[in-house]
Image (spheres, rainbow, N blue to C red):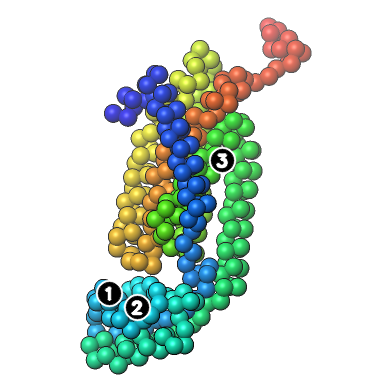
Amino acid sequence: MLNYFLKGEAGTRLRFMGMLLSAILVLLSVFTLTQKGLNFGLDFTGGYLTEFTTSQSVELKELQSFIAKNHNGEFELTAQGNSHFQLREAPSASTTANSPDWQSAVTQNDDINAQVLSSAYIGSQVGDELFDQGCLAMFAAMIAVMIYLAVRFEWRLAVGSVVALVHDLILVLGLFSLLQIEFNLTVLASLLAIIGYSLNDSIIVGDRVRELLRVQSTNVLSPATIINNAIKSTLTRTLITSGTTLATVASVWLLAGAPLQGFAIALFTGIVVGTFSSICIAATLPELLGLSAKNYEVKVDAHTQTLLDMP
């Protein structure tokens, strides 16, 4: 079905429409990031982290409602197991005046009978260091990717892959900003995974485009036709790989619980937009930059050509 739409001018038109849509989404994501920013978790902002267990299985919603009655500030309660819970509080929410109230309430209640395992404060300085180191790791990964692409591809295909990679990261960050999903270290780790996945998808398409451009018979074909043929020949493989990966990530999203929810959402979104950008950006932008079969022709000087023409 998709192969049919990728034939001829219809396929080229779809790729350019997809590229236009990507540009609009990137602008909207940047606007959202500048207006709302990211909802940084305690890993970056600092705050109080308390872990406790209950003597019997308690529903998360019931426990959350009970704690809310004895807590004056904002908090986030996550279940680590059937009777193991983790409560996160922002620095402004945890004070010496209200922090003991909810702890004494859950430990003295006979139905809950909780036992506090640990209670620690994460300083903002530690969060700043983690954020700086995480950004440095992502920047180093981007530099390594650019060097690799510069060596592997002709510069037009390399630029297309890099732009597709930046596009994927911006859209994921824009989604987290729009929905105000907590941005923590696991989400930052997922961004590094998205870099690798998006790069792999773009390289598959780019390799096929390069192979078809190197074939002598493709000189009579337009670059748009060559790119459409390259996408059609890799589309089945791309969809199968993306589909199986999405199924795995969806299982983590639905079954792993709240601690990995942000990680799964980021990775799921990154795979979807990465598959989309490998077709609409990584393969289409080089065409706009003038990619053609001539870029892969072997240049032979006059002396060598004379030797080749000799019987």
The crowd level at tag 2 (other Cα within 10 Å; few <14, some 14-19, many 20+) is: many
Tell whether label 1 touches label 2 (CB within 8 Å). yes
User: Residue tagged by mark 3?
Assistant: 162
Q: Is residue 194 above or below residue 278?
A: below
Who is closer to the viewer here, 100 or 214? 100
The amino acid marked with disc number 2 is: Phe
Sequence-earlier tag: 2 or 1? 1
The amino acid marked with disc number 1 is: Leu
The amino acid marked with disc number 3 is: Val
| Residue 53 placement, left or right of 91 | left
- Can residue 198 be seen here? no
The crowd level at tag 1 (other Cα within 10 Å; few <14, some 14-19, many 20+) is: some
Who is closer to the viewer here, 57 or 310? 57
- How far separated are the C-alphas under marks 3 and 1? 43 Å
Residue 241 at x, y percent in the picture:
37, 44
Sequence-earlier tag: 3 or 2? 2
Q: Quadrant of residue 15?
A: top left
Tell whether label 1 touches label 3 (CB within 8 Å). no
User: Residue tagged by mark 2?
Assistant: 85
The crowd level at tag 3 (other Cα within 10 Å; few <14, some 14-19, many 20+) is: many
Q: Is residue 2 above or below residue 96?
A: above
Residue 44 at x, y percent in the picture:
53, 68
Residue at image point 32% right, 29% down: 2
Residue 185 at x, y percent in the picture:
49, 64
Residue furthest out toward the right? 303
Q: Kindly identify which numbered label has been placed on residue 227.
A: none
Sequence-earlier tag: 3 or 1? 1
Q: Quadrant of the N terminus?
A: top left
User: Residue tagged by mark 1?
Assistant: 60
Q: Quadrant of residue 54?
A: bottom left
| Residue 61 placement, left or right of 52 | left
Residue at image point 57% right, 64% down: 131
